[in-house]
Image: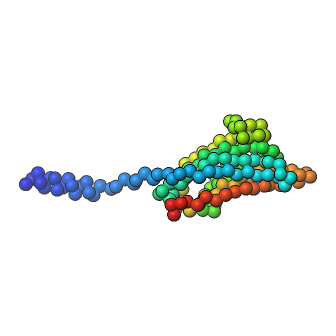
Amino acid sequence: MRSRIALLLAAIAVALLPLSPAQAAYGPPSPIILQVNASDGTQLARVEGTVAFDDGNTRFTYSLVLCRRSSFQAPYVRIYVNGVVYNTLFWNPSTTVPWCFYSGFASPHSGEVDYGAVVQNVRFELIGSSFPNNVYKEHRSGFTYDNPYN
């Protein structure tokens, strides 16, 4: 009788243990390809990479390479989450890639973002610049990736 009571108490104790959260799984990566050109068509900057969302709706991961081609000032990438600026990635050349024509020097960036709230979408915006007729001008190209899990 005591062994049955002990087994019953053990089963109740196990049932009352808090469940650990399940690990979220990332979906397939979506390609990131952005390029900015000056008004005369001169290629200023390019970014290539991927973004993927987790099925838990609160995280995403990205991996990209930022290439400076003819941008007057160093190009950069802004990341927006749900329409709000989350981070800015600056060109800091540390690798070479064949598709980076300017000098071959590119800047790799990657991250896994645990946003802590529902991620509805993520926007990547590439900003490069030109200086036509001694006037500074920024050029932008961006794309918004919707989270397929919400």
- Relative to residue 83, is residue 129 drawn left or right? right
Residue 115 drawn above or below residue 46: below
The structure residue drawn at horizontal position 61% and vertical position 58%, both measured from the top left corner, is 145
The structure residue drawn at horizontal position 11% and vertical position 51%, both measured from the top left corner, is 3
The structure residue drawn at horizontal position 21% and vertical position 55%, both measured from the top left corner, is 11
Q: Is residue 101 visible?
A: yes
Location of the N terminus (image quadrant): bottom left
Residue 67 x/y as whole percent: 72, 43
- Relative to residue 42, is residue 47 drawn left or right? left
- Relative to residue 134, is residue 61 drawn left or right? left
Q: Is residue 93 visible?
A: no
- Relative to residue 32, is residue 127 drawn left or right? right
The residue lying furthest to the right in this view is 133
Residue 107 x/y as whole percent: 68, 41
Residue 34 x/y as whole percent: 70, 52
The residue lying furthest to the left in this view is 1
The structure residue drawn at horizontal position 74% and vertical position 37%, both measured from the top left corner, is 104
Q: Quadrant of residue 109?
A: top right
Residue closer to the observer: 55 or 6 = 55
